Amino acid sequence: MTKGRFIALEGGEGVGKSTQLRLLAQALRAQGHAVVTTREPGGTPGAEAIRALLLDPAGPGWGPRAEALLFAAARADHGERLIAPALARGEWVLTDRYLDSSRAYQGGGNGLDDADLLTLHRIGSLGLMPDRTILLELDPALAAARLVARDGGNADRIGGRDSAYHARVAAAFRAFAAAEPARFARVDADGTPEAVHARVMAAITA
Ligand code: TYD
């Protein structure tokens, strides 16, 4: 049995993560791998329940610290009940967002300390990290146009934050990629889904 790998797709809103996740899963399955696809926040019934609490625009809203704890709690359930068991079975796990989203949004966006977020991850998820993190990067104007096409302007509670917030998120992602070049692959998300997919495959193979 081949060893499973844990791959996270990261990036801002509208960069095409879910399309690329689908194409990557298809390609890996065609190579004979068992593949589980999932997302954050979510992936298990408990984490999906927390997702609704976090993202519903009609929900109560949370302060930055409560928000970070809820994302960490969702991730703890996701890791324990879905990701770790799949990896133990030798399957590949592809997730649409993971820890670096908390570091970028709750850290870069909301100003929480990165070391605190990593400590929360150690407490909640035993520090489980992806083997590789694909960071999809796209010019904010192009990403905004894709979002209008997808959501028709109906952003969720976090997606709807202002452009300065999203610029801080993008800068944080870039800084994490620069700090950990062995784990991160930066992929230009401009172009057709197939063109971007080819870049993602090259990043996985490397
Ligand atoms: P989603 O609809 O999955 O957005 P996208 O299609 O852009 O990935 O909603 C996830 C939202 O939650 C998104 O705005 C990013 C945010 N988020 C955080 O703020 N912290 C986190 O740890 C995670 C996983 C997501």
Image: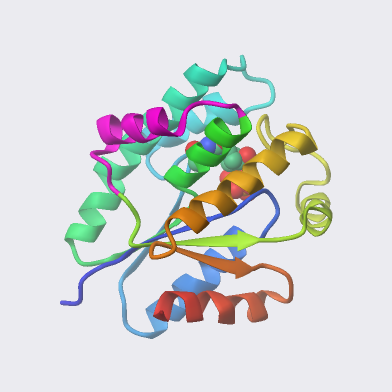
In the image, the segment drawn in magenta is 110-128
| Farthest-out residue, bottom | 31
Q: Is residue 103 left or right of residue 163?
A: left
x and y, in percent, of residue 106 in the image: 54, 31
Q: Residue at x 58, y 59 (%)?
A: 18
x and y, in percent, of residue 196 in the image: 63, 75
Position of 47 relative to 63 (above/below): below
Quadrant into which the N terminus falls: bottom left
Taking depth in this image into account, of 149 and 161 the one nearest to the observer is 161
Taking depth in this image into account, of 17 and 122 the one nearest to the observer is 122
Q: Residue at x 79, y 38 (%)?
A: 163
Q: Quadrant of ligand 1?
A: top right
Q: Residue at x 26, y 30 (%)?
A: 123
Q: Within the magenta stretch, is there residue 85?
A: no
Q: Residue at x 36, y 35 (%)?
A: 118
x and y, in percent, of residue 161 in the image: 73, 32
Position of 173 relative to 6 (above/below): above
